[in-house]
Image: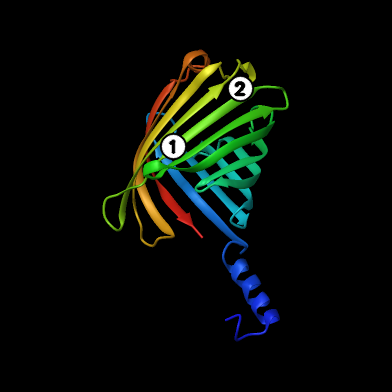
């Protein structure tokens, strides 16, 4: 091709080729879960969503999750704004800020740094540390896996661990491993972008965090049937 075309034409073609193979800017939104939960306590609702805009290497991410009672009481909302950079195939490091909103307690602001990616055998992993403006250090580790049963049916186990470096009485959080949450959801992909699901989720507060729950008359362990949707666009 270099022998047949003008050097300026070839330079423009190479520039376009590079732009289309690694320099394209795009945007995505993922609703990981939008669900209702039913158990021994109050019926609840919750959501977890995230999205990004940018290229293959550098992106701006946002994340949000929250929960409340179906009768109208909102428990808490978490929002994150992050800069993300690819550091290896399938792995990104992220840093930014997190804001927690709680109707019955003071809002909290954190600096955050974390890692997201896909481990061998396609386990999706997320780990993040959070340093609040009050100096409280907490962390969260999440893992999930999509087990495809058929072309449409997918079984997804998930596990989340929460940790704290110190006691945080105002948030009823003890030090160490504070809680464990495990879930199992079965979804049906009506389309690749939209899948309703049913499942079960178990959670347990541990250590001093469990003692805080017992002190206010709450059960530190909870099991719920969940129904919801997962979508992306």
Write the residue at 42% across / 51% down. 229
| Residue at the disc numbered 2 | 171
Is 11 on the left-hand or right-hand side of 200? right
User: How many other residues sit within 10 Å of disc 1, few (<14), some (14-19) or many (≥20)?
Assistant: some
Q: Residue furthest right?
A: 133
Q: Quadrant of residue 35?
A: top left
Assign the N terminus to one quadrant of the image: bottom right
Among the two numbered marks 1 and 2 on one chain, the one whose residue lies closer to the N terminus: 1
Q: Could you say where residue 189 lies in the image, as x and y percent from the top left?
A: 36, 57
Which mark identifies residue 143? 1
Image color mode: rainbow
Outermost residue, left side: 150
Point 62% across, 46% down: residue: 84
The front one of 78 and 22 is 22
Residue 207 in picture, x, y percent from top left: 48, 14
Spatial distance from mark 1 to mark 2, Cα to Cα?
Answer: 25 Å
SS state under label 2: helix
């Amino acid at each position: 091709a270099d022998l047949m075309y003008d050097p300026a034409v070839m330079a423009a073609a190479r520039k376009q080729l590079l732009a289309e193979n690694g320099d394209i800017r795009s945007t995505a939104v993922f609703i990981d879960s939008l669900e209702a939960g039913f158990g021994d306590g109050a019926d609840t609702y919750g959501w977890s969503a995230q999205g990004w805009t940018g290229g293959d290497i550098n992106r701006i991410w946002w994340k949000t999750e929250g929960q409340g009672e179906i009768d109208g009481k909102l428990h808490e909302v978490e929002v994150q704004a992050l800069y993300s950079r690819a550091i290896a195939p399938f792995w990104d490091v992220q840093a930014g800020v997190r804001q927690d909103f709680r109707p019955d307690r003071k809002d909290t602001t954190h600096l955050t740094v974390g890692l997201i990616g896909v481990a061998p055998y396609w386990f999706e992993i997320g780990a993040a540390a959070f340093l609040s403006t009050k100096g409280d250090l907490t962390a969260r580790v999440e893992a999930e896996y999509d087990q495809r049963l058929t072309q449409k049916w997918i079984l997804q186990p998930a596990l989340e661990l929460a940790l704290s470096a110190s006691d945080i009485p105002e948030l009823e959080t003890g030090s160490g491993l504070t809680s464990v949450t495990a879930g199992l959801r079965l979804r049906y992909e009506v389309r690749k972008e939209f899948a309703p699901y049913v499942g079960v989720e178990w959670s347990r507060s541990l250590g001093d965090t469990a003692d805080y729950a017992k002190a206010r008359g709450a059960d530190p362990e909870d099991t719920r049937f969940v129904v919801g949707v997962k979508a992306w666009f």
